[in-house]
Image: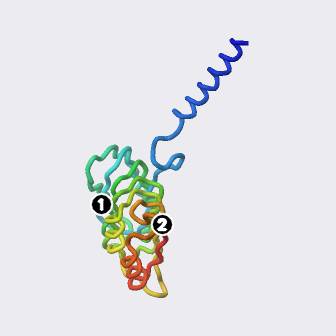
Amino acid sequence: MKQTYRAWLIAVIVIIAMAFTACPTNDNPGIPQSIIMKTAITGNVSIGLKGENIAVNWGDGKAEFIGNLDVMTDTPHIYTISTERTITITGVIYELSCIGMELKSLDCKNNSISSLDVSDNPGIMRIECNNNKLETAAVLALLNSLPTRSVDNKGYIDLSGNPGVVVGGKSVYGSVKTVTAAVKFWEIID
């Protein structure tokens, strides 16, 4: 009886230990971390990145493993043909700058991003950056950098799940959100 109990107890302990060691360690368990951008830019481009195990598929048949970047680093590429393409970045991304990339959309949800700059992208219509690590100052900077759309051609940005968006059930950037929505014509999800 004691041997059966010990065997059962050991089996339970092993199963529990396996469950804990098999769990992903990032902040978004079970969710692959990737960023998807759509652009039709031609010429020299550069994406600013900071993160771990970064790889970029440039959407033109070229891909590269960049590795770990401890500081924000420009990642250059040259496009010779003007056509719409999808750029996919994988890895654990902490900071992203896509200034002047002529983006149409940006999907960077479920990452570890604490800084995001989409300045000088007048054609961007949709940004999904929910469930990242954007604090209040980063959210305000992002909203201020959004291009002005029109009443008939509104933009959409999802900021939900970021620590700098809602604290204690209240929006921490209410007036900026209102101005961004009313003056710049963006629908903001928080």
Mark 1 is on which residue type?
A: Ser
The residue under the point 30% across, 58% down is 48
The residue under the point 26% across, 53% down is 73
Tag 1 secondary structure: strand
Give neighbour class at mark 2: few <14, some 14-19, many 20+ (Cα, 10 Å).
few
Comparing 135 with 72, the one in front is: 135
Going from N to C along the chain, the mark reached first, 1 or 2, is 1
Residue tagged 1 = 46
Distance from Cα at disc 1 to Cα at disc 2: 38 Å
Mark 2 is on which residue type?
A: Gly
Give neighbour class at mark 1: few <14, some 14-19, many 20+ (Cα, 10 Å).
some
Residue 171 image position (x, y, % from top left): 43, 70
Q: Does 7 appear above or below 168?
A: above
**Contact check, label 1 and label 2, Cβ < 8 Å:** no
Q: Quadrant of the N terminus?
A: top right
Kindly give the residue lying farthest to the bottom in the view shown: 151
The residue under the point 30% across, 47% down is 69
Residue 110 image position (x, y, % from top left): 47, 55
Residue 29 image position (x, y, % from top left): 51, 46
- Label number found at residue 7: none
Comparing 172 with 124, the one in front is: 172
